Image (cartoon, rainbow, N blue to C red):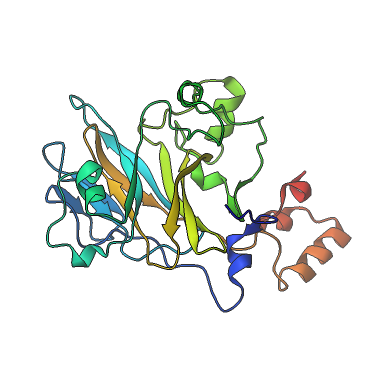
């Protein structure tokens, strides 16, 4: 596998000719039991436990995270959300399969990962499978965690990747401070995403992100040159999910903001500085 050098922000890696992608939306093609709201950002399974397969409206670009938050759960079913990528164009499907695993995968060119309450981390090279299976997702780092999640050559702002047990901008920090809980991957308000990272040899790795933590490459050798659509299977105990939008642009002051920042520093006016997104070093 070809290793990338230093992680770069997604927006910076695209350059001026490739702006941020449009907001993510669900495709008009989906399972028979799925209802997508008019905005295309919420998918709900209205009956049964199957026929809940959804797709992204557009193919993902390298490093773009298709991120969903679990909004509703339904008791009485065994199983949880499934997430992945497919090189199949949803519009070309004669019928959407009942299940993503194994039905959609059996059509070929599809890679789907079944989310469980534990044991989502992918074994590293050389790590015994039993040992990896026993490794639960780690608790997030210290109170002021690294603001970016680095996955191969991409650096993604972490804040919106993290599911919160209570609404509020800083509730995830309070959860860590008081050690209330870290949301299980399958819990309500948990956030799960999928992306792919290309390599110079024309292949790509698929990564699953759960509440701001990379689970590792869950599939390798994907065809990076082909359009890759996100797959979300609203399966069994997962009843409804909504899309969460991310911002990949540079978090540092833009050229137009720098003169005002310099003026604020000169006059010791700290309040206006809070208007701008800043790296942690400046916030401290």
Name the spot of residue 236 as percent of width and height, x first. Answer: 21, 34
Q: Which residue appears at 26% of the width and 48% of the height? A: 105
For the image, the number of numbered tags is 0
For residue 199, side relative to residue 283 (left or right): left
Q: Residue visible at 73% across and 53% down?
A: 271
Q: Is residue 219 above or below residue 26?
A: above
Whether residue 23 is visible here, answered yes or no, is: yes
Q: Observer-nearest residue: 257 or 179?
A: 179
* Viewer-nearest residue: 15 or 278: 15
Residue name at image x 73 percent, y 72 percent: 255
Q: Is residue 279 above or below residue 92?
A: above
Splitting the image into 4 quarters, where does residue 10 fall? bottom right
Query: x, y (%) of residue 50?
Result: 15, 40
Quadrant in the picture for residue 100: top left
Please tell me which residue lies in front, 107 or 96: 107
Q: Position of residue 251 (x, y in %)?
A: 65, 58
């Amino acid at each position: 596998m070809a290793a990338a050098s230093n992680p770069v922000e997604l927006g910076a890696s695209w350059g001026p000719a490739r702006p941020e992608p449009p907001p993510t939306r669900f495709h008009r093609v989906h399972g028979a039991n799925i209802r997508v709201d008019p905005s295309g950002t919420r998918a709900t399974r209205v009956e049964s436990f199957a026929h809940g397969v959804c797709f992204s409206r557009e193919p993902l670009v390298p490093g773009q995270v298709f991120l969903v938050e679990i909004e509703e759960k339904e008791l009485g079913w065994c199983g949880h959300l499934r997430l992945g990528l497919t090189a199949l164009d949803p519009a070309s499907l004669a019928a959407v399969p009942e299940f993503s695993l194994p039905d959609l995968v059996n059509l070929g060119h599809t890679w789907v990962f079944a989310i469980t309450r534990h044991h989502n981390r992918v074994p590293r090279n050389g790590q015994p499978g039993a040992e990896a299976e026993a490794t639960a997702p780690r608790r997030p780092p210290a109170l002021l965690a690294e603001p970016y999640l680095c996955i191969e050559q991409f650096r993604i702002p972490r804040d919106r990747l993290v599911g919160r047990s209570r609404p509020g901008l800083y509730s995830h920090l309070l959860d860590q401070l008081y050690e209330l809980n870290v949301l299980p991957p399958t819990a309500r308000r948990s956030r799960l995403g999928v992306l792919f990272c290309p390599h110079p040899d024309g292949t790509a790795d698929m990564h699953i992100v759960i509440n701001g933590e990379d689970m590792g490459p869950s599939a390798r050798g994907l065809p990076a040159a082909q359009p890759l659509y996100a797959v979300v299977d609203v399966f069994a105990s997962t009843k409804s999910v909504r899309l969460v939008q991310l911002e990949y642009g540079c978090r540092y002051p833009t050229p137009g903001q720098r003169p005002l920042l310099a003026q604020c520093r000169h006059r010791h006016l700290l309040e206006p500085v809070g208007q701008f997104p800043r790296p942690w070093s400046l916030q401290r």
